[in-house]
Amino acid sequence: MTTNVAYVRGAERMVTAARLAADGLYVRFADDREGVIPLRELKLPDAPERVTVPRPHVILIHLSEGGVEEIPWDFARHFVDAGYRERSEQAAVRGREVFAERLRTLRSEAGMTQHDLSHRSGVSRVTIARLESGVQLPRYKTLAELAKGLGLPIETLIAGPGARHL
């Protein structure tokens, strides 16, 4: 008999269990990774009393004075999975590179210089240069201004020329 294994897409983001102990918050993810977050790392304003997982992407720590601290899945994942931080940083770099290339290409195809796009969009030329070099990603407002300056739907700037509009 062969064994079939199914991978749940996004399992690394789904918290399946959490419990409080004297030395920290123990967390388990749907992909069976588990570990502990030392309590000192949580910087809680009050003593933790109990923990709940109301949704698969968040842990709530209920405090003795009645407050609640929310622990997002990605914060917990950094402690549980030593390679997660490196993988997420690599994905961020790749995202900046992809966006930089897309912006450069769309601007060039529109026959504009960075200065032209700056003038048409209201986004500074320095910001456009930083975006096109992959140094930073834009805020939503900047995306909207760039899309308007390029005369394109924002979806095209975000997802590329083949993006479908909802």
Image (tube, rainbow, N blue to C red):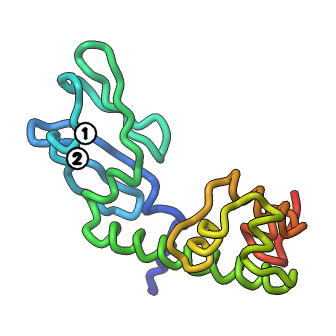
- Give the left or right position of residue 35, taking residue 23 as reference: right
Q: For numbered disc 2, what is the local secondary structure? A: strand
What residue is drawn where x is 30% and y is 72%?
Answer: 83
Q: Quadrant of residue 33?
A: bottom left
Are the two marked residues, 1 and 2, in contact with CB atoms closer than 8 angstroms? yes
What residue is drawn where x is 78% and y is 70%?
Answer: 117
Q: Earlier in the sequence, mark 1 or mark 2?
A: 1
What residue is drawn where x is 69% and y is 57%?
Answer: 142
The residue closer to the viewer here, 139 or 65, is: 139
Q: Which mark is residue 26?
A: 2
Q: For numbered disc 1, what is the local secondary structure? A: strand
- Give the left or right position of residue 45, taking residue 129 as reference: left
State the CA–CA distance, disc 1 to disc 2.
5 Å
**Residue 148, above or below 36:** below
What residue is drawn where x is 31% and y is 30%?
Answer: 61
Which quadrant: the C terminus?
bottom right
Q: Quadrant of residue 46?
A: top left
Mark 2 is on which residue type? Tyr
The residue closer to the viewer here, 120 or 110, is: 120
- Give the left or right position of residue 88, taking residue 51 as reference: right
Q: Which mark is residue 19?
A: 1
**Residue 88, above or below 52:** below
- Give the left or right position of residue 141, taking residue 20 as reference: right
Residue 19 screen position, x and y as percent: 25, 39
Residue 119 screen position, x and y as percent: 79, 65
**Residue 26, above or below 63:** below
Mark 1 is on which residue type? Arg
